[in-house]
Amino acid sequence: MSDYRRIWIPGGTYFFTLAIADRTQALLVEHIDTLRAAFAWTHRRHPFRTDAVVVLPDHLHAIWTLPEGDAEFALRWKLIKESFSRHLPRTETCSPSRRRKGERGIWQRRYWEHAIRDERDLAAHVDYVHINPVKHGHVRRASDWPYSSFHRFAREGKLTPDWAADANLVKTGE
């Protein structure tokens, strides 16, 4: 088994990517209220700041800043994944290995994390989060995707409603 090394920076800011096991499913948007409740339940027990987030049908990206002295992002993701899974009907395929470990077959076991290094790195990852629904062809404009912190950024005047509206033109060659 691989030896995964994670960077633990108390009070750090991190970019994450998590995906469901069956990438043909749209569980995250079909059960968006359950996912929101899992985030809120975890946040009440182990606070963190969500700097940016986007939820797509089969994966999500998030940027979090943890409280000073706290580097336990793994615990938070474990709780979110467990809470979300617990509230879904048991319809997924589950491998014998997962069953032996008492796991569901909803989430991929691993996730990607990246420690944000500086303001430029943060800005690049925030942009990546917000353009992701366009990149995956779900919408033509970032503002058209409902499950994104893009809307908060627009309300706060940090982004305009037409931000990256021409990104799809580059993607499609129009």
Image (spheres, helix red, strand yellow):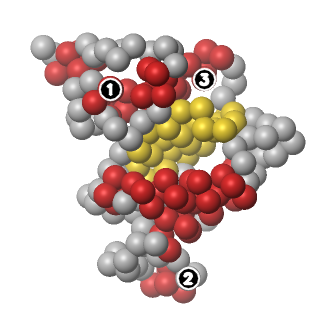
- The residue at the far front in this view is 155
From this viewpoint, is residue 58 visible?
yes
From this viewpoint, is residue 74 visible?
no
Q: Position of residue 37 (x, y in %)?
A: 52, 58
Q: Nearer the viewer, mark 2 or mark 1?
A: 1
Q: Which residue is mark 2?
A: 102
Q: Which residue is mark 3?
A: 122
Q: Position of residue 121 (x, y in %)?
A: 60, 21
Give whichever of 76, 161 is nearer the camera: 161
Give whichever of 156, 94 is nearer the camera: 156
Looking at the image, do the residues carrying marks 3 and 1 touch, with CB atoms under 8 Å apart?
Answer: no
Question: Circle 1: is it few (<14), some (14-19), or many (20+) Cα within 10 Å?
Answer: many
> Which residue does the image show at 53% across and 33% down from the upper left?
52
Secondary structure state at the residue bearing disc 3: helix
Secondary structure state at the residue bearing disc 1: helix
Q: CA distance from mark 2 to mark 1?
A: 39 Å
Dividing the image into 4 quarters, which one contains the C terminus? top left
> Which residue does the image show at 41% across and 44% down from the upper left?
55
Secondary structure state at the residue bearing disc 2: loop
Q: CA distance from mark 3 to mark 1?
A: 20 Å
Looking at the image, do the residues carrying marks 2 and 3 touch, with CB atoms under 8 Å apart?
Answer: no
For marks 2 and 1 on the same chain, the one whose residue lies earlier in the sequence: 2
For marks 2 and 3 on the same chain, the one whose residue lies earlier in the sequence: 2
Q: Which residue is mark 1?
A: 143
Q: Residue flagged by tag 2: what amino acid is it?
A: Gly
> Which residue does the image show at 75% across and 35% down from the upper left?
12
